[in-house]
């Protein structure tokens, strides 16, 4: 019988979680009660105590709890919950997870949910679900259900919300169990990074890879997209990485709004996945409306992509630094990797005659990238723009060769 972990702060929301457990059992699933509250839990007996979670988080957990600092306790329990829940899932003891929470409970329980793989059923009923949920969801498929009223008692309103939540998580678990028992004959998966300025390249490369028997999942290089792609690569579900559009590093370096964090490009190294890397759209940094561009960039070259997006051209100095960064990331790859360089433009607008054309900036990028790479990393330079079909085909062929080499 599948088991749903009910994770929550039972010291303040015990009766609500007990009601949720009753409804899940009525659907024919078992439950595992995990207390993430830092105090005793009246009216509900957990299967895993808060002490067990705290002990999993820090050796000095007793001292931390004794100080009764709310922020410290939330951080401690979030860390412990993530470790314990991840272990339970890895051991096959739970097949889904659900929680009810306010601010502290949501922070603790979604931390644990983010430690679980994509596809594992996760549902958070939260008073924060109607606002900005990005810090709680991250790059995982956490379902955030608005609690509407506070999670404070089972009444005519919360009863409906909690019953629906129980039905939802049970349905998710049943769907996941169905996939596990009758797995689909999925094709091996390749992930690709794409921007509007590299769409033609990725589209053509995708066509070639799909004809070769792969499924290609495309991520927009918009910060969240890059983080999601990195998470999927690290999950072990990916056979190859078509990282044509590394533009998020330009935003990371220059303070643009579409950065994916300093870990961008790390996942393929950690997971040992074959890859190709190209400097797609490293000519541009993304800002919002013109008035949002930092004053320090006055006088730079800009392009108004649309009323809400202002692009700034990277300078030769910035491009040289980007080349150094990308090379440093690629040097850490253990699986076969190839770097491909389109010498006639890294985006639509940096091609000759385009508003971002700068031979000096491109040359600084290419020179820095090539000189920073280990001699063992193959580099292919093509005298075409990034969206030329010849460049797309070269990227696809190189990735197929790297995948074959890794499998040999």
Image (cartoon, helix red, strand yellow):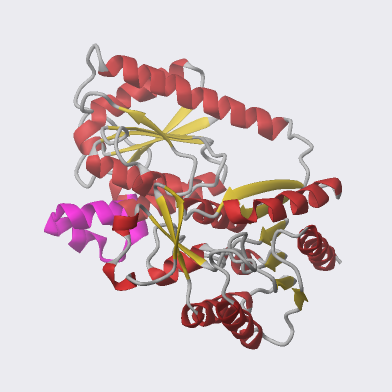
Find residue 59 and report its image quarter.
bottom left
**Left or right side of 339 for 264:** left
Determine the residue located farthest toward the front in the rendered image. Answer: 353
**Left or right side of 7 for 71:** left
**Left or right side of 354 for 144:** left
- Provide residue 253's location: percent of width, then percent of height: 43, 72
In the rendered image, is residue 24 in sight?
no
The residue under the point 66% across, 54% down is 192
Find residue 266 and report its image quarter.
bottom right
Out of 249 and 41, give the one closest to the viewer.
249
Magenta part, dominant SS? helix
Magenta region includes residue 178: no
State which region is magenta: 52-77
- Provide residue 274's location: percent of width, then percent of height: 72, 65
Out of 89 and 268, give the one closest to the viewer.
268
Out of 255 and 131, give the one closest to the viewer.
255
The residue under the point 53% across, 82% down is 320
């Amino acid at each position: 019988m599948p088991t749903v972990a009910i994770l929550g702060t039972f010291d303040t929301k015990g009766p609500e979680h007990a009601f949720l457990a009753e409804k899940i059992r009525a659907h024919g699933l078992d439950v595992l009660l995990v207390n993430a509250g830092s105090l005793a839990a009246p009216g509900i007996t957990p299967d895993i105590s808060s002490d067990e979670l705290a002990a999993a988080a820090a050796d000095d957990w007793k001292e931390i709890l004794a100080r009764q600092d709310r922020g410290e306790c939330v951080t401690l329990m979030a860390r412990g919950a993530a470790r314990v829940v991840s272990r339970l899932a890895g051991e096959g003891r739970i097949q889904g997870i659900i929680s009810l929470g306010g601010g502290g409970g949501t922070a603790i329980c979604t931390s644990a949910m983010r430690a679980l793989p994509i596809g594992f059923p996760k549902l958070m009923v939260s008073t924060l679900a109607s606002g900005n949920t990005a810090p709680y969801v991250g790059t995982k498929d956490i379902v955030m259900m608005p609690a509407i009223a506070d999670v404070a008692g089972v009444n005519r309103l919360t009863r409906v919300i909690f019953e629906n939540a129980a039905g939802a998580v049970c349905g998710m678990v049943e769907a996941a169990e169905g996939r596990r028992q009758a797995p689909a004959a999925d094709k091996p998966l390749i992930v690709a990074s794409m921007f509007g300025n590299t769409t033609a390249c990725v589209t053509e490369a995708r066509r070639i890879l799909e004809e070769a028997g792969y499924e290609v999942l495309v991520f927009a290089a918009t910060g969240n997209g890059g983080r999601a792609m990195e998470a999927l690569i690290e999950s072990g579900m990916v056979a190859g990485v078509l990282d044509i559009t590394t533009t998020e590093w330009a935003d990371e370096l220059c303070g643009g709004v579409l950065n994916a964090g300093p870990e961008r490009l790390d996942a393929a190294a950690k997971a040992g996945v074959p890859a190709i890397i190209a400097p797609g759209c490293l000519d541009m940094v993304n800002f919002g409306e013109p008035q949002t561009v930092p004053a320090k960039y006055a006088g730079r070259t800009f392009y108004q992509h649309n009323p809400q997006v202002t692009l700034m051209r990277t300078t030769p100095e910035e491009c040289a630094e980007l080349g150094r960064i990308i090379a440093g990331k690629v040097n850490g790859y253990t699986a076969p990797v190839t770097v491909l360089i389109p010498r006639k433009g890294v985006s639509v607008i940096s091609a000759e005659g385009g508003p971002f054309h700068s031979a000096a900036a491109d040359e600084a990028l290419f020179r820095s990238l090539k000189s920073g790479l280990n001699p063992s990393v193959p580099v292919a330079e093509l005298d075409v723009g990034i969206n030329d079909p010849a460049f797309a085909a070269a990227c696809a062929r190189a990735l197929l060769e790297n995948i074959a080499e890794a499998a040999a």
